[in-house]
């Protein structure tokens, strides 16, 4: 806190008002943490980061959660479309869990966490949010809130049928349908592939309460992929402003 504001007489630093507030780590370690995260397509695990930075795994985990907070979406303009809409499920297989942790077998948010996604074909931008359910009452408002009703919206599942004011086409993967004219979700499928590969190959497990942070992380990294490394890091630092994240909040 090397600077002092004359009117309010409070001390401040470059960390004040950001996700780095109150952090005792040198800024150089934060620079490296952001660099390692942004240069890895599937992210960096806390186990690797704590070895690279010569710290504890807990500190590395907390650092990465604050970096993910930088990708938390702000109010943004609706996608103009055409838009692809699809959802995926995050979490491990029931057969790999300890017996006392196993739940009802099956596909869906009962066992895993559902993440809804949208991709704007015009801009290539993606938004991903955790949803409680994959029924019409949940998915349709998500699509309405993030898209312009004047453009066609290729979608995939039955819950998105009957959306008023939108041109709507579907493909049904369960019966072997992947492309219906211009309607397909191949762009989002590519994103989900990276999302799931990161889970299985890098993190191996993430808590259900934090899945939304990983969704924001990978959507955010996808959206800045055309920037060079320095611009990506600047984007992350700018995203940390106004996003105070406490360890007690993360672990509550």
Image: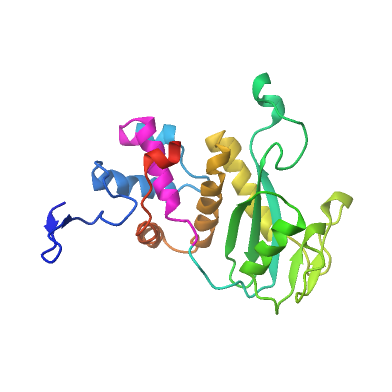
Q: Is residue 92 above or below residue 109?
A: above
Q: Position of residue 42 (x, y in %)?
A: 53, 45
Q: How many marks?
A: 0
Main secondary structure type of the part rendered in magenta: helix
Report the residue that reaches farthest toward the front.
8
Residue 44 in view, yes or no: yes
Q: Horizontally, is 172 left or right of 22 in the view? A: right
When asked about the image quadrant of residue 185, the answer is bottom right
Find residue 112 and report its image quarter.
top right
Does the magenta segment cover residue 63? yes
Q: Nearer the viewer, residue 120 or 114?
A: 114
Image quadrant occupied by the C terminus: top left
Judge whether residue 144 is colored magenta.
Answer: no
- The residue shown at (44%, 40%) is 250
Residue 78 percent coordinates (x, y): 59, 72
Horizontal arrangement in the rendering, residue 137 relative to residue 16 (left or right): right
**Residue 76 spot, x, y in % from top left:** 52, 69
Q: Position of residue 85 (x, y in %)?
A: 70, 61
Residue range highlighted in magenta: 52-73
Residue positioned 29% across, 57% down in the render = 17
Compared with 37, 58 (above or below) is above
Q: Work out whether 147 lies above or below 73.
A: below
Q: Nearer the viewer, residue 223 or 156?
A: 156
Q: Residue at x 59, y 66 (%)?
A: 124
Residue at image point 70% right, 36% down: 111
| Residue 45 as seen in the image, left or right of residue 13 | right
């Amino acid at each position: 806190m090397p600077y002092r504001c004359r009117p309010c007489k409070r001390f401040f630093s470059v960390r004040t008002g950001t996700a780095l507030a109150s952090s005792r780590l040198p800024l150089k370690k934060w620079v490296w943490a952001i660099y390692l995260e942004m240069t890895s397509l599937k992210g960096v695990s806390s186990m690797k980061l704590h070895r690279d930075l010569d710290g504890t795994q807990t500190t590395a985990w907390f650092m990465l959660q604050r970096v993910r907070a930088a990708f938390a979406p702000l109010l943004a303009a609706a996608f103009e479309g055409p838009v692809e809409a699809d959802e995926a499920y995050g979490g491990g297989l029931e057969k790999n869990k300890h017996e006392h942790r196993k739940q009802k077998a099956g596909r869906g948010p009962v066992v895993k966490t559902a993440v809804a996604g949208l991709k704007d074909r015009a801009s290539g931008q993606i938004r991903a949010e955790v949803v409680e359910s994959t029924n019409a009452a949940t998915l349709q408002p998500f699509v309405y809130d993030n898209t312009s009703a004047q453009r066609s919206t290729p979608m995939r599942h039955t819950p998105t049928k009957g959306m008023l004011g939108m041109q709507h086409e579907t493909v049904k993967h369960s019966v072997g349908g992947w492309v219906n004219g211009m309607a397909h979700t191949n762009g989002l499928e590519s994103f989900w592939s990276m999302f799931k590969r990161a889970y299985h190959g890098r993190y191996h497990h993430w808590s259900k309460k934090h899945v939304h942070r990983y969704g924001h992380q990978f959507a955010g990294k996808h959206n800045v992929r055309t920037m060079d490394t320095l611009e990506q890091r600047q984007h992350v630092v700018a995203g940390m402003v106004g996003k105070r994240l406490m360890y007690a909040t993360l672990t509550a």
